[in-house]
Amino acid sequence: MRPHSTTVQATTEPTTALVRVLSLMDNASRAIGRPDARLLAVSKTRDAQAIARLADAGQHTFGENYVQEALPKIAALRELGLEWHLIGHLQSNKADAAARAFDWVQTVDRIKLVTALARHRPEPLPPLNVLIQVNIDDETSKSGCHPHDITTLADAIASQPRLRLRGLMAIPAPDPDMRRRRTAFRAMADLFKTLQHDHPGIDTLSMGMSEDFIEAIEEGATMVRVGSLLFGPRPPKSESHA
Ligand SMILES: *Cc1c(COP(=O)(O)O)cnc(C)c1O
């Protein structure tokens, strides 16, 4: 395993952490001769003030896991013009709120969600950017579609004028063996390439978190989702978000 988790210490100084993460991302992209991957700053459990500080440092793309938690932050920071991605499991009864508040939904994994998001995306807003979440290796997770279902979902999304298919997302099992994580990343990169044949407009493969974003980029990620390395360790999970 690479020593990046020791070279990037989560710090209370978000600007420093941001610069370090971006520089490691840049090195990884350069090493494989690919354009820079995008950084999604994962701001679940962080308050609007912490997000504003990172925005001040130049970060404009943020990811949230829970619609209810995100809505007040999105409202409070509206004038900063940030781009908001939903990266947590989305229940169909929250599709309405998600389609209005977010710019991207990365966790579309069933047809019911496709139709609900399309129906609720308000007309004055541009089409909602959508990623299909794929369950690549985590049998314990109930989120993400089976790889065999990608084509059907992609065609359904592409047929909706209020949605824009941008690519694929995955949360591989947090295997301590980094080789197995790489195997999952590589499998996702293959699925992404296959999907690009039928949907040449897609441009986003979202995978990799604080522990493995460098490996993810090396295997083909175009967007990584980093939380604790930017904001510091998260407080233990509370039941209130369930
Ligand atoms: C929390 C979360 C992340 C970020 O995790 P860190 O380990 O804090 O970087 C990324 N993606 C998803 C889907 C998450 O829920």
Image: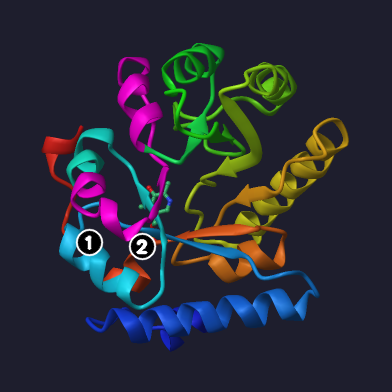
Q: Which residues are magenta?
A: 73-101
Residue 234 tag number: 1
Do the residues under discs 1 and 2 have CB atoms within 8 angstroms?
A: yes
Instruction: Using the image, determine if residue 19 lies above or below residue 95.
Output: below
Picture quarter containing residue 92?
A: top left
Instruction: Using the image, determine if residue 60 lies above or below residue 185.
Output: below
Asked whether the viewer can see residue 219, the reply is yes
The C terminus: image quadrant: top left
| Magenta-span inclusion, residue 79 | yes
Picture quarter containing residue 31?
A: bottom right
- Label 1 residue near ligand 1, CB within 8 Å: yes
- Rendered location of residue 205, percent (x, y): 65, 49
Whether residue 101 sits left or right of residue 171 in the image: it is left
Instruction: Name the quadrant where ligand 1 sits.
Output: bottom left
Q: Identify the secondary structure beneath mark 2.
A: loop
Asked whether 45 or 143 is in front, the reply is: 45
- Label 2 residue near ligand 1, CB within 8 Å: yes
Name the residue beneath numbered marker 2: 227
Asked whether 80 or 208 is in front, the reply is: 80
